[in-house]
Image (spheres, grey):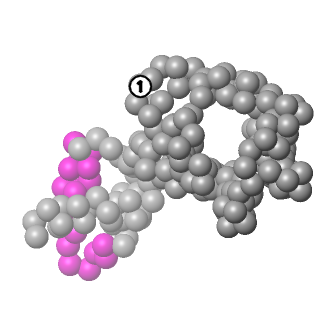
Amino acid sequence: MTSETQQKILKALQGMLEELKDWLKGLGCSETQVLEIYRQILLEKGMAARILATQTANVFPVIPHVQVNPDVSADFELIRSGAYGDRLLEMPEPDPGELEAFLESMKDALPKLRLHFSTSSKFGPRLKRGGRPKELNDPATREEIRSEIKKLRGPGTKLRDLYIRLGRKHGVSPSTIKRIREEELDGKS
């Protein structure tokens, strides 16, 4: 491999590692902490390890034949040291298309990983907040309100006035009283 190709590859890898370090720093993590978690997951050899290995291969589609190594910290140190550059010089020169694809994959690796996290997180479980708690949640109270409306309603009595009156009595808005009444009407239909 020529020294020019070697420098292009090293520059792409160093750029990706710097972006990774900045990303982790923004999350309040160190590279060492994340690498330890990564290593523990891969050594477990369970479902999480398979998912992580598959996603790692998807982020770097140019090199699918490379095995994911649990001791990735050694790989990081090798890339940062001069030994990796020397190793690159011993490798055969890649054709221009492969080199360009590899350099692009290095440039796109972390943005693709971020996109994967963003997309896959949408498929995860959601918090079950259940929405806003109902006012007057007690079924007996709700039934009592409906029966009061029936008793008080008569010729010349506007429903709006009843909603306001009962709302004040129970400490809720007139629209809440209206919804309680409409629950009964919806149940009959």
Image coords of residue 34 (percent x, y): 69, 29
Give the residue at x 59% y 29%: 69
Image coords of residue 19 (percent x, y): 81, 47
Residues packed near mark 1 inside 10 Å, few (<14), some (14 to 19) or many (20 plus): few
Give the residue at x 85% y 37%: 86
**Residue 17 shows in this picture:** no
Label 1: element kind:
loop
The relative height of residue 89 versus residue 44 in the rendered view (above or below) is: below
Q: Nearer the viewer, residue 141 or 127?
A: 127
Q: Main secondary structure of the magenta part?
A: helix
Q: Quadrant of residue 18?
A: top right
Start-end of magenta stretch: 140-159
Residue that badge 1 annotates: 46
Give the residue at x 25% y 66%: 182
- Give the total of numbered labels: 1
Tell whether 53 sits left or right of 114: left
Is residue 182 on the magenta stretch? no
Is residue 144 on the magenta stretch? yes
